[in-house]
Amino acid sequence: MPHPTAPRRAVAICLALGGFMLGGTTPAPAAGPTAVERIVAAALADSSAFALLTDLCATAGPRLNGSEGQRRAVDWALRRLREGGLAGVRAEPVMVPHWVRGRETCTLLEPFAQHLTMLGLGGSVGTPPEGLEAEVLAVRDFDELEARAAEAVGRLVLFDPPWEGYGKTVQYRSRGAVAAARHGAVGCLIRSVTGSSQDTPHTGIMRYDRGDTIPRIPAAALSVADAALLTRLARRGLPVRVRLAMGATQLPDVPSANVIADLPGRELPDEFVLAGAHLDSWDVGCGAHDDGAGCAIVMEAAFLLKRLGLAPRRTLRVVLFADEEMTQQGGRAYARDHAAELPRHRAALECDSGGFAPAGFTVQADSATVARFAALAAPLAPLGADAVTPGGGGVDISFLAEAGVPLIGHRVHGEHYFDVHHSPADTLEKVDPADLQRNVAAVAALLWSIAEAP
Ligand SMILES: [Zn+2]
């Protein structure tokens, strides 16, 4: 690692003399910077989070469930967590779905021939090997589909809704194929779930009807530009014919793992503060923001405390979850396998919003806990990370809510997150090293304060 070790040792010695390791000899406030100030200063003087993220992306590449990249990522994480000096580094087995994209194309045939920019949706079935050809029914939303249901039979239904934010617009990706198939469509196309793209297609998980009474039809995302093209042509009353060919297949589940490591607590080692992110990604780009950045932030937060010689009162546990993108088997497995420990989880924080400039935290807990965490985040104002509002923690840690674990979501200024999310554009150069480091500062400081609290 490209960091001089001498200044760090000096800081660690200062802290030891300052009373953190002398069992209750509290230093006078004027004696020097607080631990949080030291953590923030050390994080901002550093650049190791971006180096770590670069190493992940270069070693593993994209990390789709069941892929070679995903296996390399698990090995990489085990090695880096051990090198970072954490304890109990281990891979806890998780079975995950294994969907393979295969070759895929989408071609406009009429009113003129043109290649369309597409990505199949995760979990989709494939088409026959020769592809399927059909006329496109372009609709704005579910309401328009219902109104024109009779026209959907034998067609490829295109949903081209306006971007109304991820939470709202993603329903066309999740449920579009079922809605279209219910009315006899042979395939489903959606406008990529993004507010802005330069012809990038954005994938993501889709779902079929569980009852299996509605046929499973292939589903793919078009770039915003190509969805708009088809809509424009259809509105002119032209016949719009498309050939969609997808080699997608669902294979049997495969073994994967949650990767776990601890920075042991010095007084209450059996109490935990969990810091999580997900190690899997989609198979395009390299998942730099989603969620390589989150992995780098939580790993570096733990490494930073370790390097500073700061052993928290409670154990800080890093968990890199498997399978966030498809069926969240990693989050479910952690909640199941660690059920006995969950009453001793004082908080769980998840970083899965990208590596943009920090904006604060959301907290899913009772109002007293929200207020307590807000007070602990107050010193992060210089980083812009002191805003604490009630809100969800994150997909992987959501399974801990039932056990009463307070959940914390890491927030960033993610105005451009969905420009790259789940697309070939989610690559390293979209991540700002200084922003990433500010996130390490904010997350490490908050984790420390919670792990240290009386
Ligand atoms: Zn994610």
Image (tube, rainbow, N blue to C red):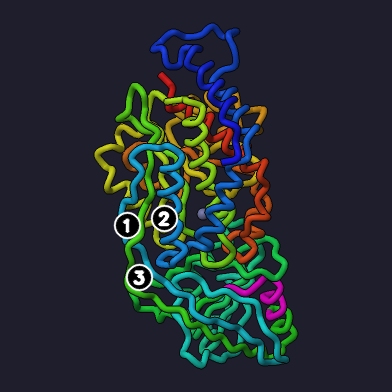
Taking the spot 62% from the left edge, 66% from the top edge, the residue there is 424
Mark positioned earlier in the residue sequence (3 or 1): 1
Taking the spot 67% from the left edge, 28% from the top edge, the residue there is 382
Mark 3 to mark 1 CA distance (whole Å):
22 Å
State the extent of the magenta-drawn residues as a range. 221-230
Q: Nearer the viewer, mark 2 or mark 3?
A: 2
Residue placed under numbered mark 2 in the picture: 74
- Amino acid type of the residue that numbered disc 1 sits on in the rendered structure: Val
Characterize the local packing of mark 1: few (<14), some (14-19) or many (20 or more) Cα atoms within 10 angstroms. Answer: many
Residue placed under numbered mark 3 in the picture: 210
Is 236 displayed left or right of 361 in the figure? right
Residue placed under numbered mark 1 in the picture: 94
Q: For numbered disc 1, what is the local secondary structure? A: strand
**Quadrant (top left/top right/bottom left/bottom right) for the N terminus:** top right
Residue 127 position (above or below residue 450): below
Mark 2 to mark 3 CA distance (whole Å):
31 Å
Q: Position of residue 421 (x, y in %)?
A: 60, 59
Mark positioned earlier in the residue sequence (2 or 1): 2
